Amino acid sequence: MVFKSWIRPVIGAIAFLGMTLTGYLTWAKFTGQAVSCLVGSPEAASSCQTALDSSYGTLLGVPLTMIGLCAYALMGGLALSPYIIDPVENKSLRAGFEQVTGQGLLVGAIAMTSFSAYLVSILVFELKTFCLYCTISALCSLSFLVLTLGGRSWQNLGRIVLNGLLAAVIIWMGAGFLYAQTPPPITDGRTPIPKLTTLPEPGIGWSVTTSSGAAEIALAEHLTAQGVKMYGAYWCPHCAEQKLLFGKEAFAKIDYVECASQGKNGNPELCREVGIESFPTWQIGDRLISGIRFPEQLAQESGYQGLMEFQYTIPGLYGRF
């Protein structure tokens, strides 16, 4: 399968972009760091975080970002590997390798595009959020398909399209089956916080409906005494989940800074001065720690030595604690 001369380098470049993107997201997933808003506003970063931390962000226990990283690496390898063979001294070997890798590129492009379409449908209809990182990745996958189909002349294009549609249906059904096999997260005997099923109240956000125990209250008092601050925004779902982990009584004791200008007691100037890039962010001493922090993490990071019988957890938050 001989492509036009510029097709393989372009596919390789897009694969590198995809590897950079998914590599960063995989690092954020494993380190528990909040997704940066380098490619958008904090609202956009928060929406991406919601998608990554959902149960759909992991497939059979493996972060979806890692699967994407491997897929992009494979596509890059298929696109560029023929260039290691000298086209003059090993002309027949080079031609055969181009044929095999070309078929692999077509199959990979169909698979990645189909799976990306499945994930976009989950974002739109199930999670009801927008993820810029996910959209860029989906466009990269679609670019692979457009380039592999448009990069050469096809004698049986109709048959290829029909086979591609059949493959897409199989991938959609397979993805649904595999997600159904994903084991439920371990809650460690603690109570899962309630899911956020409504839109945030303008300027206020979501109500804190959980009740605090003695451990949550003691930790909150310790954090405030140590000068620890939490920066967030009323529209940020992960900020609401962080509050639910503490409970109403305990969170009332937290030194909370509202970074949204339209939020109650909003202080966006302070947030910009401190250097807040994503929500929630905790300031412990001179350190800024992004992302949801479980009470155990905050206890360790702040030197808390009190009660540790915390009540709540977030079952869908994989790989964060």
Image (spheres, rainbow, N blue to C red):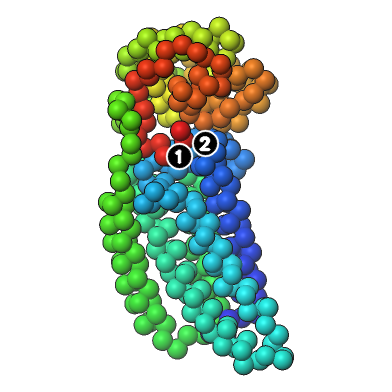
Regarding residue 163, the answer to whether it shows in the image is: yes
Badge 1 is on which residue?
A: 319
Regarding residue 193, the answer to whether it shows in the image is: no
Query: Residue 177 location, x and y as percent?
Result: 27, 57
In the displayed structure image, the side of residue 120 where residue 9 appears, left or right: right
Q: Nearer the viewer, residue 128 or 189?
A: 189
Marks 2 and 1: in contact by CB < 8 Å? yes
Q: Residue at x 58, y 27 (%)?
A: 289
Query: Residue 57 location, x and y as percent?
Result: 41, 46
Q: Secondary structure at mark 1?
A: loop
In the displayed structure image, the side of residue 189 where residue 123 appears, left or right: right
Query: Residue 75 location, x and y as percent?
Result: 54, 68
Q: Residue at x 35, y 71 (%)?
A: 167
Q: Nearer the N terminus, badge 1 or badge 2?
A: 2
Query: Residue 272 location, x and y as percent?
Result: 65, 24
* Whether residue 266 is situated above or below residue 101 in the rendered picture: above
Quarter location, residue 204? top left
In the displayed structure image, the side of residue 53 where residue 41 appears, left or right: right
Q: Nearer the viewer, residue 136 or 304?
A: 304
Q: Amino acid at mark 1?
A: Gly
Badge 2 is on which residue?
A: 32
Q: Residue at x 44, y 29 (%)?
A: 238
Q: Residues within 10 Å of mark 2 (few under 14, many from 20)?
A: some
Q: Residue at x 53, y 21 (%)?
A: 300
